[in-house]
Amino acid sequence: MNSIQNVSRRGFLQGAFAAGTFVLGMSVVPKQLWAGLSEEAATVFHPDMFLSIASDGTVTIIASRSEMGCGSRTALPLVLADELDADWSKVKIEQALGDEKYGDQDTDGSHSVRSFFEPMRIVGSTGRAMLITAASQKWSLAEKDCSTEPGFVVHKPSGRKLSYGELAPAAAKLPVPKKEDVKLKSRAEWRYIGKDNALFDLPDIVTGKAGFGMDAAMPGMVYASIEHPPVLGQKIKSYDDKAALKVRGVQRTLTIDTFKPPHHFQPLGGVAVIADNTWAAFQGRKALKIDWETSPHAVYNSDQFRKTLESTSRQPGKVVRNVGDVDAAFAKGGKIIAAEYYTPHLAHASMEPPVAVAEYHDGKVVAWAPTQNPQGVQETIASVLGIKKEDVTCHVTLLGGGFGRKSKPDQVAEAAVLSKQLGKPVKVVWKREDDIQFDFFHSTAAMYMKAAVGADGNPTAWLQRTVYPPIASTFDVNAKYALSEMSLGWNNLPFDIPNHRAENGPADAHVRIGWLRSVANVYHSFAIHSFADELANAAHRDSAEYLLSLIGPARIVPLEARPDRSDEQALYPLDTARLRRVVEIAAEQSSWAKRRSGKGHGFGIAAHRSFLTYVATVVEVEVDGDGRVKIPNVWTAVDAGTVVAPDNVRNQFEGAANFGASLALMSEITVSNGVVNQSNFNDYPLVRMDSGPKHTGVYIVESDAPPAGVGEPGVPPFAPAFYNAIHAATGKRIREMPLSNTKLV
Amino acid sequence: MIRFKVNGTEKTYDGDPDMPLLWYLRDVAGFTGTKFGCGMALCGACTVHQNGEAVRSCSVAMKDVNATLITTIEGVSAAGMHPVQKAWMEIKVPQCGYCQTGQIMQAIAFLKQTPHPTDSQIDEAMAGNICRCGTYQRIRAAIHKAAKEMA
């Protein structure tokens, strides 16, 4: 894999790359990483244009991953530019279309930098080597005396200098050197990696020029707003659009068929109002009268369902990891501590609601969308319209937040379906109410925890059970057990406990279930680290000291049952020395040892590894006499291996503290008779500047380890650290999210 | 006929007088820097200035725009040279960036009235603007920086 080709003179170059004089293509698909890809996609060379240099010196680099605020659209081109020794001010970034030649483009799982760091380095360094060869040939001077400075090859002994633009035509004629003949820069030679570079799109963002999905337009497009079935799976029995059609600006109404289960990313169905502008489409919807058929999901009531989940969690489930013999240890008697935890559904609520523009013409679709998953757009539209995936072109705009919601392209498929019926481009705009009511919800979950503790308070046995409707239910109506969620903080407990068993129980899904920033880590980390703190309290021991003793000595934790990718296990072993280190740093930065909790002021700690990154968080809370909670400080220590853009990583973790504060303090989705009860920021509140953490300090561990995730890992430790702080401040143990459901006073 | 100015340019409008200014700006006039977030004045993403005051354009009907001066992010400084924009870039505030034009418009109007704000004044003034990415502490820092710059 990683075969690089000089494609400068090929006829198929398009767009910005057509102007490129020197173009390197690369097949970046490491086959073993992407088991889901076809054999052909993994092995056949595709001219993936990642780099082009024009004769005016402009360097164009492809961003194949989506930008939703995590910074990968900047970070990955920056890595390539560093190895190329490009002048960053002359770099243009071109957003890739959806195409399987780029390998995985589904920008989730916090792995953009993790998966593409090395490929980007190799393309950049190969380009640099070829430019040096071109210069040395031009000068008839030895390559060994040539080096580079940003945008130039220089010959130090003679002081000669040629720009990359001047060299591009000659480089374009050279054969590509073998990988082993290309030397990557040493870390000391990096100019951009590890430095505080701004986001590429920053100037456009602050001037309002940045192009989000909401801003996409096609000539001649009309606007659509869709009344979805209130309950998942309902079909239209009948509808009356007479009043809707009288609304000024409304052109007509159209229907979209309700999906056939499993729903996957298909449109939900419903009645679309087509109008001259977004507002008219919204108004038209208010005037619609629709009778819906019944759906089996109308039985769903989340408060009753909670009881079902909890009762399942008290029963033995499927064993997903077993160490020693928990049952034998419990049978010995001694002190047994058990606790149950519950978390509700959550909605993603990215600031930009789902939106897309699509045009169907002559069996082909062109779409513009704020999508984390452009190949998912191709597949979904192809499947819904019965056309070929290759006949769907997906342009990726900037995303106004994503958090996992925008991996699911149902709204793009809606636009394509409507465009096919209308014969013109359609822009589908979801209202905030649509976004919150028709999300792919973060799962509600119940956890049962039980431990036997010795005289020193340390656990001799630790049993944990988790139950929730799994993400797999989106793809399989019969799915009841979690799959990939198990590796998200459940089958890899990093504690040094001789007897340990992790289980997962079955649950049905009655709303669409999806992944939300850090996914199952949210409830898993909540249960594990709340329970750890409960054990520390029961033993009358300091919470941070107790956490370190649970983690135990520095070692690599053997995880035989771990379903993670095998190459990642080799590159990223679960190393408790790194986990201990972040706990120690968070404690040190927060002056943990000197802090005294009580009387409405408290400190809590939690440490969780997710997306291969080690994070420890200390939260400080103040609870006043009326039970109002303030969060003056958060301290987060992060070991994410090699960090490309440290300031952006700090920003991600500052943001994660706020994201964590929203779900810990106030956000909750409930369902009655299959209908979601919340609809906008009035009843689905998020933290604001006056209610989130006042200050979050982020402490990045310097590391040469391979890069790990940064978008999600800050979220999981926040809630348990926060609730542990609430306990320290008030003596109240919170076992369900969010805090707003518990009266502190 | 409704007459008003957007970013100093005369405009007229004779469509639905109940249409919110937000959708006029975005769908009719093409000022897409102003964002749709909630439609109920709950999130601040659509903040613009009407006669110099910050308003939620999703909740201002076109009939109430008559004879007023509207400023959108496009009218602040296309080159990003306003001190608030510069502070936003220096502090590297944005993540996804979607809410940030609304945040900037809110901050500019606020600083006009409160040129030397305290933390709690900032928190109060900005509490109507949600940032789901959670860049609040950088927004606060950028407002302090801009205030110093403008003093």
Image (tube, coloured by chain):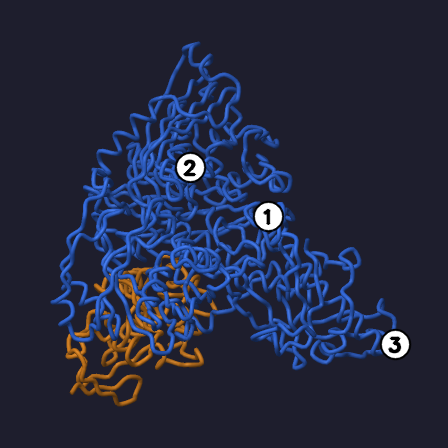
Chain colours: A blue, B orange
Can residue A122 be spotted in the picture?
yes
The chain identifier of the residue carrying mark 2 reads A
Q: CA distance from mark 1 to mark 2?
A: 21 Å
Q: Answer above or below: position of A501 versus B122.
A: above
Nearest the camera: B135 or A424? Answer: A424
Location of residue A513 in the rendering, given as x and y in whole percent from the top left corner: 35, 44
Residue located beneath label 1 in the image:
A641
- The residue at the point 64 percent across, 76 percent down is A20
Q: Is residue A132 left or right of residue A265?
A: right
Q: Answer above or below: position of A464 versus A228.
A: above
Establish whether labels 3 and 1 are both on one chain: yes
Marks 2 and 3 in Cβ contact (< 8 Å)? no
Q: Kindly identify which numbered label has been placed on residue A52.
A: none
- The residue at the point 38 percent across, 52 percent down is A265
User: Residue flagged by tag 3: what amino acid is it?
Assistant: Ser
Residue located beneath label 3 in the image:
A140
Tell me the SS state at disc 3.
Answer: loop
The chain identifier of the residue carrying mark 1 reads A
Q: CA distance from mark 3 to mark 1?
A: 42 Å
User: Residue flagged by tag 1: what amino acid is it?
Assistant: Gly
Front tag of 3 and 1: 3
Tell me the SS state at disc 2.
Answer: helix
Location of residue A82 in the rendering, given as x and y in whole percent from the top left corner: 65, 64
Q: Earlier in the sequence, mark 3 or mark 1?
A: 3
Establish whether labels 2 and 3 are both on one chain: yes
User: Residue flagged by tag 2: what amino acid is it?
Assistant: Ser
Q: Earlier in the sequence, mark 2 or mark 3?
A: 3
Residue located beneath label 2 in the image:
A525
